[in-house]
Amino acid sequence: MHRVTIVLCTAALGAFCLGCGKGKGKAVSVIGSTSVQLFAEMLAEEFNKRQPEGSNAYVEVQGGGSTAGIQAVNNGIAEIGMCSRELKPEETGLTPIPIARDGIAVIVYKDNPVSGLSRAQIRDVFAGKITNWKDVGGSGKPIRLITREEGSGTREAFTHLVMGSSRIAGSAMTQESNGAVRELVIHDPAAIGYMSLGLVGKELKTLTVDGVVPSAADVINGTYPLVRPFLFVVKDTPGEGAQRFIDFVLSDRGQQMLEKEGLVRVK
Amino acid sequence: MSRPRVRAAIRWLCTLAKRVNQETLVSVVLTAMALTAVSGLAVITAFIFKEGLPLIMKVGLKDFILSSDWHPLEGKFGIFPMVVGSLAVTAGAMVIGLIFGLGGAILLTQFCPPRLVSILKPSIELLAGIPSVVYGFMGVVILVPFIREHIGGPGLSVLAASIVLGIMVLPTVISISVDALQAVPRPYREGSIALGATEWQTTHMVMLRAARSGIVAAVILGMGRAVGETMAVIMVAGNTVALPHSPLDSVRTLTSNIALEMAYAAGDHRKALFATGVTLFVIIMILNTIALRFSRRRAGGTRSR
């Protein structure tokens, strides 16, 4: 009985040790903004599929947020960080590589009669100065604000582009991802939120900002005011695998894929 | 490691085991295992206090707990709305948990035919095995729209979180209350019935009183679970950093504050989240200590029967 157990244990250990030796090569890990994550996953899948036989480069994508991504690159946990805002002055020693541009859409329930707001109006709404839809030409419902959590790249870009020195009101409900914001606004007739333009989909109404419809074309020619960069962030010189992934993302094929998903190409 | 070496190592361990007294060996191994679990607690405690306490000192305990300004990027760390949020949601959950949990426990021990018990009890225990994200999802899909349309407010609210948590604590409350009620000596019940009391009179005048401390322990352990629950609460509470004025307002709890902002936090912000954890830790420790005291008293009572 004992002997059988010992043999089994040994076999298991042996198999485990053999297993360690094989496996794939070192993964290029890409960590950061949830706004960029979906697109990066798609690019990574295509990149991994295109690797020639025998090549051991492959890319792994994780979320976590812009700030977390930058930290991960700084600590050497990730080779590439994803960031959905401009780097801050104190985030030094890193090289930002713009991979695309994205609009921030201001979204409301699909049957909301309001079709557009000015940037000043959006600021007052999110600062809690305008609290009822009738003050901006809508129904008499109180406005329900939906925002992202502190530190989110989308929130930081929105604050930077719209809020100026005002703060987002404390009464705003906080959701932890683009998807969660979207889910809430789809079902709540009185809600207003903001999210990545590339992820909006069809069940929502996007408001015009300063009279400009948010569309890829208007992001390109610069008329839509709420635009932010999507960055890959690297430290020093990226490794061979990471560099190949970056080259792929910036290649015509990679840029086309991003464009098809509603982002705006940089090349 | 190569295979022959592993085999040699195991063989060596076996001969060692034969030489040492087997009883001693087993007790040493078991002690080591138990200590590993306890040292986990010690490490967690030491770590969150080490990370969190300096910030509380820096901000000041009073400003940290009693200020309502939570603007971590501007260096303002006041967690009062979250403390209130946690307490409000927990209180609501306990009202629901107590009413339904105690009702269920009374039914199961006093009024229910044994065959029904054998169906009901396992299904209640099954509730404990459902992952919290599933509760949260059900809350978002069914409960939140219902509250928004029929009661008012944004739907994501103290009320929604309380109901979801109330259901989640039911297994804890019911199974411990059932144990407490079953621990009441049989002669109490028989004596009461013999004196001419009805079933219900016996239940609320004799059984519930005799089992009181156990029921209190059940409620407090349920509270511990409700205070600590995170995922379901993030999904249904709305996470507003503001003091709630009614059960229909949305709130943020201490746990959701940590979980929401952890991914992004750096520097003092991150420390503030650990400090939030310290606050939570203290609250849960207090609750558990109270529960332990009550259940000790109960154990003492049972022994004297």
Image (cartoon, helix red, strand yellow):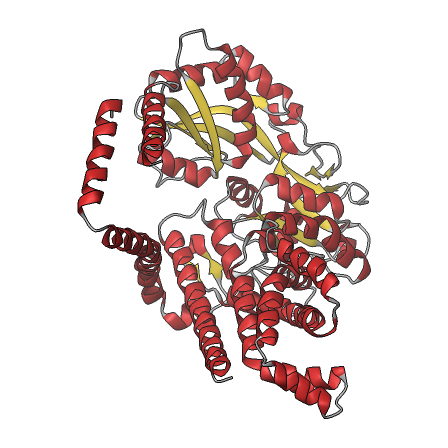
The quarter of the displayed image where residue B148 is located: bottom right
Where residue A140 appears, x then y in whole percent? Answer: 81, 57
Residue closest to the eye, B25 or A19: B25
Where residue B181 appears, x then y in whole percent? Answer: 61, 75
User: Farthest residue toward the bottom?
Assistant: B195
Q: Is residue A21 above or below residue B56?
A: above
The quarter of the displayed image where residue B37 is located: bottom left
Q: Is residue A50 above or below residue B210?
A: above
Residue closest to the eye, B96 or B191: B191
Left/right of residue B124 with respect to residue A266 in the rendered view? right
User: Farthest residue toward the front?
Assistant: A1
Left/right of residue B151 with respect to residue B286 in the rendered view? right
Would residue B91 be seen by someone viewing this image from the given angle? no
Where residue A31 appears, x then y in whole percent? Answer: 44, 32
Tell me which residue sits at (76%, 53%) in the image: B145
Where residue A122 appears, x then y in whole percent? Answer: 65, 47
Tell me which residue sits at (56%, 59%) in the image: B252
Tell me which residue sits at (75%, 49%) in the image: A188
Residue closest to the eye, B101 or B9: B9
